[in-house]
Image: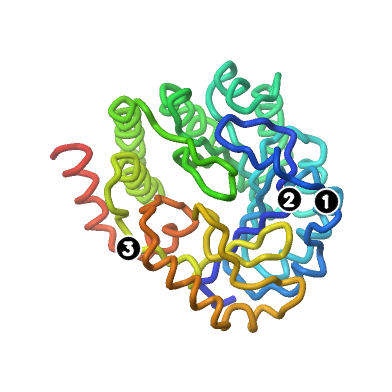
Amino acid sequence: MKTKLHGSIIVTYRCNARCNMCGAWNYSPGFADEIGPDVIRKLPDMFFANVTGGEPFVRQDLPEIIEELRRKSARVVISTNGFFTERIIELCKRFPDLGIRISIEGLEETNDTIRGIPGGYHRTQDTLKKLREMGLKDIGFALTIQDLNYRDLVVLYKMARESDYEFATAVVHNSHYFHKLDNKIEHKEAVTAEIKKLIRELLKSRKVKEWFRGYFNYGLINYIRGNKRLLPCEMGRDGFFLDPWGDVLACNGMNEKMPMGNLKTQSWDRIWNSAQAGDVRQAVRVCEKNCWMIGSVAPAILHHPMKPVLWVLKTKVLGV
């Protein structure tokens, strides 16, 4: 499948969590009009697709959606809070090549406070353990860094490394997607100091993938400090979002929703090549948010020369 296109498929805004940095769960009008397998069938071929929400596993027809999506994408990863353990296990038995990324926002007390799910931390650990026991290879967890959890960052990375889990990071931010415009980092120096510690740990690895993750986390520091992003944004060209109502978006990070078109009523080619899509791409080009967005920079990082990446990390982070 020769394509560099990647997509994030938001199958629902419904969620059983009540995270402090996201208000999407409070603005979800129900499931009657959510996209189904018939809309997924209209998507183009991709090299990577992330299925997200809300919480994807609240959808009873998620297996049918995944079945269609696997025909479109070389790799499919589901982002989940890990609460619906049995549903996750059953889906992975059916599709053992799936990737699963579970959101963990800190150690037990911190995680359960941020996510608003009593006992949620133990539930996520149980889900990870059962996925490992069944032999699933592509598993890991992700943390959204904020003032409440930055002290747990390095501890969680070491936990992931010891268990051979993938470990991803993000920084709390604002967008129409989250229905939040008041998220911010108050303790910038303390938070960036912890991210630097994480980068040092990543650079100890012999895996080139971990070095690129170090570069990405340097981008998080750059974002927190309000500096211009390290790499140009290619969302709307190499990447897109599909929301639960069928709207195709260049990005979910804008303060205002700007659809390119709607996949329920239009074909992919008509949407992607439309004048409306061109207007959205222009808005992305002049966007001043300078966000870090993993979905928008990952492909660019993978094609970035290794020597400049290491030079940036050694001089800007390690000071050597």
Neighbour class for label 1 at 10 Å: few (<14), some, many (≥20)? some
Apparent side of residue 147 relative to residue 203 in the rendered image (left or right) = right
Q: Residue at coordinates 66% horizontally, 78% vertically from top-left?
A: 268
Front-lying residue, 26 or 295: 26
In the image, farthest residue toward the left: 320
Q: Secondary structure at mark 3?
A: loop
Q: Is residue 296 above or below residue 127?
A: below
Check contact, mark 2 vs mark 3: CB within 8 A: no
Mark closest to the chain's N terminus, 2 or 1: 2
Say if 161 sits above or below 311 in the image. Answer: above
- Dividing the picture into quadrants, the one containing residue 123 is top right
The disc label shown at residue 31, or none = 1
Q: Which mark is residue 12?
A: 2
**Residue type for callout 2:** Thr
Tell me the distance, in whole angstroms, between the alpha carbons under discs 2 and 3: 34 Å
Disc 1 residue type?
Phe
Q: Position of residue 71 (x, y in %)?
A: 73, 70
Residue 34 at x, y percent in the picture: 79, 57
Going by the image, does 181 lie left or right of 29?
Answer: left
Residue 43 percent coordinates (x, y):
69, 72
Along the line of sight, the residue nearer the viewer: 106 or 158: 106
Asked if residue 69 can be seen in this view, the reply is yes
Are there few (<14), some (14-19), or many (20+) residues within 10 Å of tag 2? Answer: many
Which residue does the image show at 79% across and 48% down from the upper left?
91
Q: Toward the viewer: 181 or 253?
A: 181
Q: Which residue is mark 3?
A: 304
Residues under numbered marks 2 and 1 in contact, where contact means CB atoms less than 8 Å apart: yes
Question: Mark 3 belongs to which amino acid?
Answer: His
- Classify the position of the N terminus by image quarter: bottom right
Query: Is 80 rendered above or below residue 8?
Result: above
Q: Nearer the viewer, mark 1 or mark 3?
A: 1
